[in-house]
Image: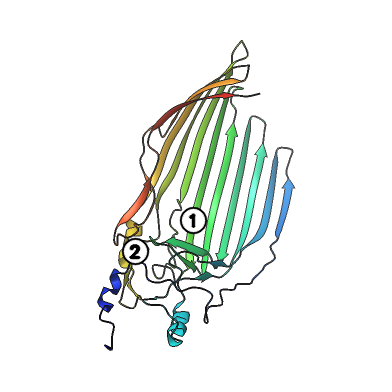
Amino acid sequence: MPAANPLNGLKALQFLPPFMNVPNAVESGKLSDGHWNWTARLAYEFSDTLNAYASYATGYKAASVNLSRDSRPTAADLTALRTAGLAVTNLSSGSRFANPEYSTVYEFGLKGNWGVASANLAVFKQSIKGFQSNIFTGTGFFLANAGKQSAFGIEFEGMARPTPELTLNLAMTYLDAKYDSFPLSAFGDLSGTRPGGVSPLSMTIGAEWNKELGNGDRVILRGDYHYEALFKLVEGLPGLVVKNSQGAIVDTAPALAAGRDFKQDINQVNASLTYAMANGIELSIWGRNLTDNRTILQIFDSPAQSGSISGYLSEPRTFGGSVRFKF
């Protein structure tokens, strides 16, 4: 019998190595945890139309188990499995479990309602210790805990009704999010970087004109514009991480570069026109994404195609109609 398997050179070509079942002699597969959460809130009314509030809340997400095809033991457990002679062929380390995550949120806000107009303003700070990151790898998921993720945000919602028929709406969100500490992500150390899929600024402007006719019917015209400032879709792509013959990561630069290269902003206009009859019948025509702004909603590693990338496209310009009856 040869000292080494003569087929070891083909190891890299094995698309789905044998799965290491859990529980086993090293991994018990059992998790147990719990936590009390609470919320404190103070509010003060300046007048019948204006009030302020401050709140503090805690949150908790239980420990998680990676049930995907990419569920693999930690590096320490892999060593123990190999020492005990229990590791299946070509087994490499990865993620199997994630510890609980704990969050705290501070929020301060103002709420006003003057009849013809209203406005809500909120400022918040959120911190999540042990944030559970779940990244698609093309065949499964890589589950891991970040040391800490934090976000500072400002939200505004406003409404104005300059005439009985016309209503204007505005909603805006500013969000500054980052991984304060995430040294063991699927792409190496992400500490100090911004999470993928998070736009720093989003805004929606809407208007509705609702006109009653002399016979009791109504004509309703609606329109809105949605904007999201440029943001990266993902932190990186696990399929582009370079590993050695033992499955250990040796270079994360290509994976992280892909995350930096794929960015998008969103500009979308929607509108509808409705004729609402007094007998409950409503006839509508509508259009979505009227400017035909095409974007990529998400990207991920293509299954069984190493180095390839797949993605989901946004909805193209679409027109339609509908008939409803209210009773």
Residue located at (46% from left, 71% from top): 95
Q: Are marks 2 and 1 in contact (CB under 8 Å)?
A: no
Q: Quadrant of residue 156?
A: top right
Looking at the picture, tell me which residue is in the foreground, 210 or 273.
273
**Mark 2 is on which residue type?**
Gly
Q: Which mark is residue 89?
A: none
Q: Position of residue 245 (x, y in %)?
A: 30, 77
**Mark 1 is on which residue type?**
Asp
Looking at the picture, tell me which residue is in the foreground, 282 or 171.
282
Residue highlighted by disc 1: 176
Q: Quadrant of residue 103?
A: bottom right
Q: Position of residue 304 (x, y in %)?
A: 32, 60
Residue highlighted by disc 2: 239
Q: Position of residue 184 (x, y in %)?
A: 44, 72
Looking at the rendered image, the quarter that the N terminus falls into is: bottom left
Q: Secondary structure at mark 1?
A: strand
Looking at the picture, tell me which residue is in the foreground, 132 or 105.
132
Q: Position of residue 326 (x, y in %)?
A: 63, 24
Kindly tell me whether residue 249 is visible in this rendering.
yes
Q: Secondary structure at mark 2?
A: helix
